[in-house]
Structures are given as structure tokens and as C-alpha cells.
Amino acid sequence: MTLFPPELLNLISPILPFLNDGWKVFEVWWWVFPPFLLWGSFLYLYRFWRQTIWDSTVKKVLLEIRLPEKIEKPIKAMDYVFAGFHAIHDVMTFREKWIEGQFQLSISLEIVSIDGKIHFFIRMPEMYRDVIESNIYSQYPEVEIVAVEDYTKQIPADIPNREWDLFGMSWENTKPNGYPIKTYINFENEAERLEERTVDPLSGLLEGLSTLGPGEQTWLQILCTPIRKSDQPWIEEALTIRDKLVRRPEKAPPPPPMITEAIQIIVSGPPKKKEEEKDIIPPEMKLTPGEREIVQAIEQKISKSAYSCHIRTIYLGRKDAFLKARARVPYGFFKAISSESIGGLKPNKDTMTKYKSIPFWFLDKRRVFLRKRRLFRDYCKRWTPYFPKSPGHYKYVLNTEELATLYHFPSGIVAPTSSVERIETRKREAPKGLPIE
């Protein structure tokens, strides 16, 4: 009795000699294939090893920006601040990148509510402290900047545990990088139409954060890495989107090599030339008002310096005070700066600390636990997901105008909540002529 039916044996018998020869070759040369198959994993682990070692040698500092009661500067001032921050961009040599493990360092913009008290933090490499402080003081001379202890160290590192729990996620772009989010300029225009003095997109978020009670915290983190055109071809992507919207003809592909073109002519004959249809009305004149607004927004975005960003939010607290519904406070803020026509931000389901599956339902709790641990670790280390090489949808391009919308210093008039930590006095220069001794 044979294992296979005779019909199948008759079918495969002609190829058995080839399979036998192939197996003999594989037995001798099998070691050639693993390096090619494992090269990607090796490169990832090597970069993680080298970059982790180098990153541990870079001293970090967490600065808290304490605000005065009254800030007279508009949100546009923060736009100039982020333009100045872009000076931390650096270019790595081959040795620095692959041997020493250096990479472009980032800064972390953080809005934190601890027991209902709101703080503005910026975490950065200490070598960039002068650049950061000088740009902030140039636009906001009344603020006070102090180095503080990292607030994340006040939370147990093994969260979630018996006493603490958390809920959080990362946020991703709703559209490709070429599309912008709604910026403070959109809100100012709306304010003018409604004859209001000013509208601050942060005010709703700050009011929500101020409702937290003892034992509750909400963390909002924006990781910003300065980029240029050579680092990421996002400008070309934006221009392609713009040209498609204005119905411009696509660029002709480069001509094939002469040999390839000769073979094509011999086989299929000379290519037929397409007759171009001339349109009396230019494509730009056919745009609808909505399309024209999108094109203007795209061109406005590519006109300013940009950062590769990652945003995440975490709500955490002691279990006796933990209320999962409060984790939705940032939703309204991100909804306000999103638009169906241009771009926006939405929760990333892969990082959300919630998981419901059908075939492997018995592993749901374990997967949620691991997601919480990973999210908390990445936040504390200020890492993007899957550091050092995050997939593309975890990082997105925001220019200085968009960042200023997400992170700026509100005045006490626009955001009157008493939960924002403010300094009571304003700094002034000392009068001239005072005795030194």
C-alpha cells in the first residue's frame, strides 16, 4: 500500500529527478540563502544596538515653561519659535550613522495634566538647550523656563499593575503628508467672520485637562524631528497631489534605452503618437472653491520648514480614581484641527490599548497588557513605535504652522482656566544706576 495514489505518482514522477538534484544542491549551498533572508532583521537589530548605545551617551533635559497671567503675543509667534528650533537639524557622515550609531535627535513637546494642574514641557538633548531657550525668549520674554525632574519617573515602571492603570494610543494622519491639518489661521479667519476677538484651538483641550482629579493624569506628547527635502521626499508628494487636483498633465516618463526602443520597434512597430486635445479653458479655472482651498493649503504647507512628527496621548491614574471615559478628552481637540477636505489626525488602532479579536479571544487581555507596557515605555523614552525604524504611517510631516497650532502658550484671556500653571509676576529689567555694592 502506497502513501500516494498511483495517479499522483505518475504525475510527479517526471519531475522527481529534478527535485532530487535540487535537494543535493541545497544540501551543499544552503548557507548562502540565510544572509539574504535575514539581512533586513540583522540591519534593524544592528541599528537598534548602535543607536541605543549612542543615545544613552546624550544627556537629556526636561524644561518646564511657566507662563505669565497675560500673554499678548498671537499664536503666530510660536510659528517663528518652531522655525528657530529647526536649527538643530544635522547631517550625518557614513561613519557617524553606521559605525557610531548617530541619528537626528528630536525634541518632545508635552502638555501634561497632573491632578488637574496643567504644565507645558519641552524635553530635548542638553546640547540644544541654548537654541531652544533663546528662540522661546525671543518671542515670549515674560515666560520662565526651568529645568525640572522627569514627571514620568513618578509613575511605577511596571504599569499597569494592581494600583495603576492606563489607556492611550498614538495618532496618525488621515491623509498623505502633502495634506495639512487645520491651523490657527483657519481659526482666526472664523473668529473674524463671527466678530469674535480670538479663538484658540487649545482652549477646549485645556478645559478638559483641568477637570482631572487627584490620582489622575493625562499626557500629550509630540515628538518632532527636523527634516529637509533631502531627508524625506514629502514636498514632491505634495506637488504631485497639487498637480492632480489642478488637472495638470502628468510628466512624461523618461525614454527607454536605445536598445530597448529598437527591440520594441522591431516587434510591435513604431509607437503611435497621441493627438493632444487642446482645451480653451485652463485647468486652474475649472477648480471648485473647495479644490482651490485645498491647493492653497498644500502650497502654504510646503512653503515652511517641516518636522517628522509622532503624537501620542496617555490617560493614567490610580485604579480607585481611574475613569476610562476621561481618556477621550484629547479627541475633541484633534477633531477640531481636522477637516474632511484637507487633513487631520485620527487614533492609530495598532497602538490603541484596546483589542478585541474573534479567533484568538483568549489572548486579548495579554495583548492589551503588552500594548500598555510598550506605549508607556516608548513615551518615557521618547521613542517612536518600533524604534529605531518606525513604519511610515507612524510618522507624518507637520510644518511650523501646524506645530504652532498643536503646541503654543495660551494667554489667560483665551484660556482662563486656573489650572494652567502661571507665574504671578512679570520679569523686568533692573533700573539703571543701581549701586553694585
Image (cartoon, grey):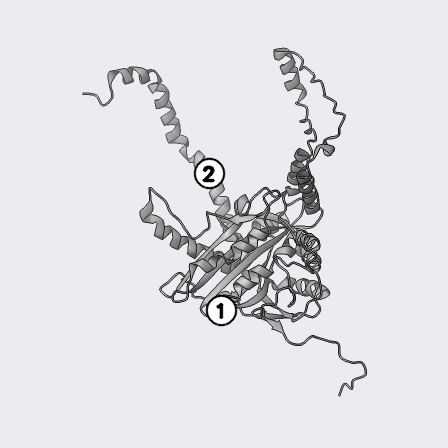
Judged from this view, the residue extending furthest toward the front is 194
**Residue type at the position of mark 1:** Asp
**Residue type at the position of mark 2:** Pro
Few, some or many C-alpha atoms within 10 Å of disc 1 (few <14, some 14-19, many ≥20)? some
Asked whether residue 17 is in view, the answer is yes
Residue on which the image places disc 2: 35
* Nearer to the camera, 69 or 235: 69
Secondary structure at numbered mark 2: helix
In this rendering, the answer to whether 293 lies above or below 369 is above
Q: Name the N-terminal-most of marks 2 and 1.
A: 2
* Nearer to the camera, 234 or 426: 426
Coordinates of residue 81 in the picture (x, y in percent) = 69, 59
- Foreground mark, 2 or 1, reads 1
**What residue is drawn where x is 65% and y is 11%?**
269
Report if the CB atoms under discs 2 and 1 are less than 8 Å apart: no
Q: Quadrant of the N terminus?
A: top left
Residue 78 horizontal side relative to residue 152, left or right: right
**What residue is drawn where x is 48% and y is 44%?**
42
Quadrant of the rendered image containing residue 145: bottom right
Residue on which the image places disc 1: 115
